Image: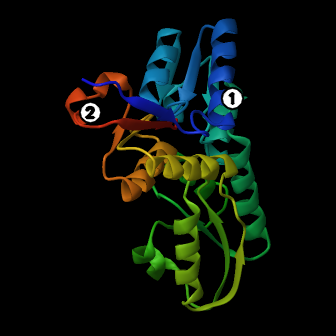
Amino acid sequence: MNDMRVLVAEKCGFCHGVRNAISVAEKVLAAEDDVYSLGPIIHNKDVVERLAKEGLKTVSRVEEVRSGTVLIRSHGAAPEQIARLGEKGIKIVDATCVLVKRVQHIAGELEEQGYQVVIIGEENHPEVQAVVGCAKDVIVIADESDLHRLPPNARLGVVCQTTQNPEHFGKMLGAMGRGSFSELKVINTLCKEAIKRQESAIRLCRQVDIMFVLGGLESANTRRLAELCVKVNEQTFHLQNWNELDTSVLHGKKTAGVTAGA
């Protein structure tokens, strides 16, 4: 195989929120014995497995925790879940990303102001589920097929899952604008760091023969990177880690690009 030139995206890797969650988990694990995470601390299998070896137990429901300390993961948790942990006397350490907390806070404020809260995002994503738990009635819109959920002539207060891309956010707002509403209030809750990583990855895609996106297969922001990259360069591969690399795809390639998410 001939030598290959490898270029790394200018902006890539774990964002501040993910790095903070990992750091918080490591500090708590070093100080305490009985530590749980309410859902995977981040969407990266390798990191979750490493922290599990250090003693972090991942649970999916509050009922699974009877004692010890619970970490609230980077994606956050619904206030009702946190309240139930408190009622059980469980120590809570909050590792929620500050940007996710902002979305939660805004959703609550919009509801108090009389708006029908709408979040553009993936209904089953834990960040979105946590935001849904911050208001009594939140409508989740993933794409245009969900627009029928919006009530006619309503005052709509719209936020967005932090890791969505600006193009999709704008497209959905345009689709809502063509519908029936009495007022449309939009708060841009996109993560600027995620946008920078997306833009950097797209620029690199155009310069290389093959593109690799490294990161958790369950990670929304990493999947988004891969989706955007493949639109520009069909030779794009999303890998959890380099162990998944099939070297046959490198045949005939002279330049490779690498980016990474969570």
Query: Where does the N terminus fall, quadrant-wise?
Result: top left
**Which dot marks residue 20?**
1
Distance between mark 1 and mark 2 Cα atoms: 35 Å
Q: Is residue 250 left or right of residue 129?
A: left
Three-letter code, disc 1: Asn
In the foreground, 83 or 138: 138
Taking the image as drawn, is residue 43 in sight?
no
Q: Is residue 158 above or below residue 79?
A: below
Residue depicted at 59% across the width and 57% down the height = 161
Placement of 173 over or under 90, stated as above or below: below
Judge from the rendering whether residue 258 lies leftward or rightward of residue 184; answer left or right: left
- Mark 2 residue type: Leu
> Is 125 placed above or below 45 here?
below
Residue 198: image x %, image y %? 55, 51
Mark 2 lies on a secondary structure that is: helix
Q: Is residue 221 above or below residue 115?
A: above
**Residue at x 52%, y 82% (from the top left corner):** 175
Residue at left 26%, top 33%?
A: 250
Residue 138: where, in percent of width, then height? 59, 66
Residue 252: x and y in percent read 24, 37
What residue sits right under mark 2 in the picture?
250
Q: Which mark is residue 70?
A: none
How dense is the environment of label 2, judged by Cα within 10 Å: few (below 14), some, or many (20 and up)?
A: some
Specify whether 8 is left or right of 234: right
Which numbered disc, 1 or 2, marks the residue closer to the eye? Answer: 2
Please report whichever mark, 1 or 2, sits nearer to the chain's N-terminal start: 1
How many tags in the picture? 2
